[in-house]
Amino acid sequence: MPLFNVRVYGILIDDHQRLLVSDEFIRGNYITKLPGGGLEIGEGTREGLAREFMEEANLKVTVGAHFYTTDFFQISAFNHTDQIISIYYLVHTDNTATIDAKEKPFDFLPEQVADDKGTAEHLRWIPLATLSEQDMTLPIDKVAIGMLIKQHRS
């Protein structure tokens, strides 16, 4: 039976005008996406996003303004029966210097990606000046990034 899968993602831009992204190895696939993930039963979207940032970046964030919610049909890339609803917020923090970020995409150790059923992830900054929709893997992220680029370059 098809289900809705609600996802929450954060747009975090630092003082150097860089966007925080997450490079992930999931089930044999390399994916660049925005930090965030699945909403858990019993939590609100803002609470879920704050939890995701704590889990992924050990970072306490303030969830700010709503940025975008999926407005088109998108089937899940991993479960081909679920419809994805993604909600994006602007997020803020005072301590981006504490984020452990890599310089290169998918800079994983060989043992981190040896099991194609395993997962690995790391964070990375992309300068807004060079950011492109093609930097993202997932279709809904591409839309959100396109909106962000338009907003920051106009």
Image (cartoon, rainbow, N blue to C red):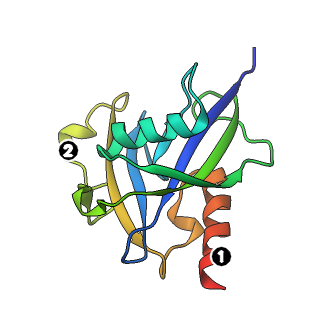
Q: Is residue 114 above or below residue 126?
A: above
Residue 50 location, x and y as percent? 45, 41
Residue bearing mark 1: 151
35 left or right of 77? left
| Relative depth, front residue between 112 and 62 | 62
Measured Cα–Cα span from mark 1 to mark 2: 38 Å
**On the rendered image, what quadrant is the C terminus found in?**
bottom right
Inspect the image, locate mark 2, and give the three-letter code of the amino acid beneath it.
Pro
Which badge, 1 or 2, comes first in the chain's sequence?
2
**On the rendered image, what quadrant is the N terminus found in?**
top right
| Relative depth, front residue between 98 and 129 | 98
Name of the residue lying farthest toward the bottom:
154
Residue bearing mark 2: 110
Please tell me whether mark 2 sits on a helix, a strand or a loop: helix
Q: Nearer the viewer, mark 1 or mark 2?
A: 1
Residue 11 location, x and y as percent? 52, 58
Residue occupying the point 27% across, 58% down: 101
135 left or right of 153? left
Residue occupying the point 56% across, 30% down: 39
Residue 106 location, x and y as percent? 32, 54
Residue occupying the point 26% across, 66% down: 103
Viewer can see residue 106: yes
Residue occupying the point 65% across, 68% down: 146
Residue 140 location, x and y as percent? 66, 51
Q: Is residue 75 above or below residue 4?
A: below
Please tell me whether mark 1 sits on a helix, a strand or a loop: helix
| Relative depth, front residue between 80 and 43 | 43
